[in-house]
Amino acid sequence: MKRVDSKSFAVIAIAVAAVLLVAVNMIANLWLSGKRLDVTQGRAYSTSAQVKPLFAKIAEPITVRLYFSRGVADLSPRHAVYYQRVRDLLQQYAKLANGKIQLEFYNPEPFSDVEDRAMGFGLQAVPLGQANESGYFGLAATNSTDDEQVIPFFNLEREQFLEYDLTKLIYNLSEPNRPKVGLISSMPVEGFPQRRQQPWAVMQQIKDFFTIVPLPAEIAEIPKDVGILLMIQPEHLSEATQYAIDQFVLNGGRALVFADPNPESSAAAGMEQMPQPPELGSINKLLTAWGVKVVNGMVVGDREAAIRVNGGSAERPLVADYVAWMQIRGTNVDAADAVTGTVKQLNFGTPGALEKSDGAGTTITPLVTTGLQSMRMDSDKFVGLPDVVALFRDFKPQNKKELLAVRITGTAKSAFPGAIGGKDYTATSKQPIQVIVVSDTDFLTDRFWTESQDFMGQQVLVPSADNANFAVNALENLTGSPALSSLRGRGAQNRPFVLVDTIRRDAETQYRESEQSLSARLADLQKKVQTMKPRTDETGAAILSDQDKSTIESYRGDILTTRKELRNVQRALRENIDRLEGVVKFLNIGAVPIVFGIILVAMAAARQRRRKRRAAQA
């Protein structure tokens, strides 16, 4: 038998491998089409089990038209891959809907009837750079009653939210009659048209699923068709309004309450700054009867969860941890509750503390808490521009978790001893009440959870935290319809280096203490120099003795030395953090390829030794 040489064998092996590759792909396409294996964290590419029944319950047909120009694929391969993902997901939805979702795919050629229809739906055209031609990558869907939902363009920045966006679109078309939510708020959540201030972005998120019914602060009865109350900083509620809310909840109404002892959003929204603290007494009266209260005049901070901000000025920027602005994640968010089960991160701004009230008889379930490195601080420290560095320096953790958001359930008693204004009176709830309370309103403002990016003249919201998801999840849960809650936590995939942050924070604590000591010493020396008053002669000229001159020179020398030490401490802090970041970058970028390189070299060396041994034996 003729022996095949090594070169020929290598060619045959490559040819066989190529044939096998083609065969495996053909078999996979034939037998495994529609099969998916999702091994991503959080199963971000799998259809949620809670969402599947939503498609099965679609009663009227929905037509979904997906428009994608080949010219877009030619210019951007990433959009071509994205298009395939959109198409695959829509086909999954159509299969789950048992024929109630009809799919249509179009390639809108320039100057064609298809392009005219795409423009008629309001899809966003993008220039292709060829004879003023335009391309499209959008979606338009309609139901049997001609309701219409459109995604003008599938922006790559929102690719991680694809399943949420598509499911929301189908949900809106399949459920045209949305639950009504009564809104009571002293904050400009709906915007100020006369001041050209836009509504808070979270309100549009809520309106995608609910009909908002604004209610005045002076209201004697909650409308019958309102099933949920959304109260955002409900201040100065009249007794009649308090009674109406109390009876609403005791008779089966649900409530989501945001109450804040230090609402920064008031000033940020252009509202007049009140000289006295917010009036939370009226809502606290109700909350206390239901089981919790917001602690007045106190702000909660968490050193471990602090957000880094610029605490200096434009001339002298100073980056530091702002202990009253927090990123809450991990075990501090209840993973077992439907509202927070899929939430990855929540951002808070100077929130208050919630305390359980005595004798309420209800069950208080923590939804969001701080870590053990928390502390209560007087809200007076946050009037105007707070001293971020001083707050961090003076922070003394209390080794206690503070409640930031809770769920109240169980049998509750009325906050009133009897009926008011001849109204019907319920002394004890007829069924377990359902109330969710959050001790922050800044939580809902745009800057704490989203960024607005301009795309072809349109503003696209890209969430950086799950604050809006929490609000919508809570409202859906209170309606008893948490169909989309499982999708909302998939958007914000911020995975920080927790160990690195801990090391940096400990180092910064040490350096800030040294900085405080040196700053105090420097101020004392400067004060001593200023208090030395020289004698004057007849003409008023200053006379300094040799001892005075020597003392002043000594002080000035100490001042220069102290300033140098202070600069060295501040430089050491920066160098320590930069060194730590350098190590992390090396481990992530360089170490892994180096390790693999060493392994490959070792394998090659071992193979060479085996060949030499075989050659020697032959």
Image: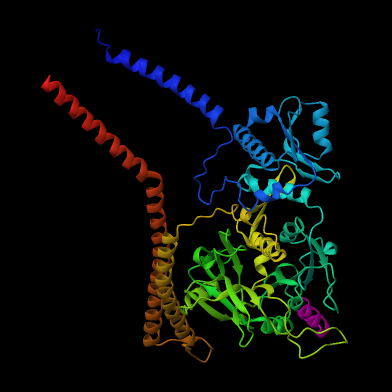
Q: Residue at x 49, y 84 (%)?
A: 530
- Does residue 158 lie above or below 9 as drawn? below
Residue 237, horizontal then vertical, whole percent: 79, 81
Q: Residue at x 38, y 84 (%)?
A: 551
Q: Residue at x 59, y 81 (%)?
A: 355
Left or right of residue 460, residue 512 in this image: left
Quarter of the image for residue 99 reads top right
Q: Is residue 299 visible?
A: yes
- Quarter of the image containing the C terminus? top left
**Region of the chain picked out in magenta, as a range:** 235-248
Quarter of the image for residue 497 reads bottom left
Quarter of the image for residue 69 reads top right
Residue 254, horizontal then vertical, whole percent: 73, 71
- Does residue 178 lie above or below 459 as drawn? below
Q: Which residue is drawn at 45% across and 19% down?
A: 19
- Does the magenta run of residues contain 244? yes
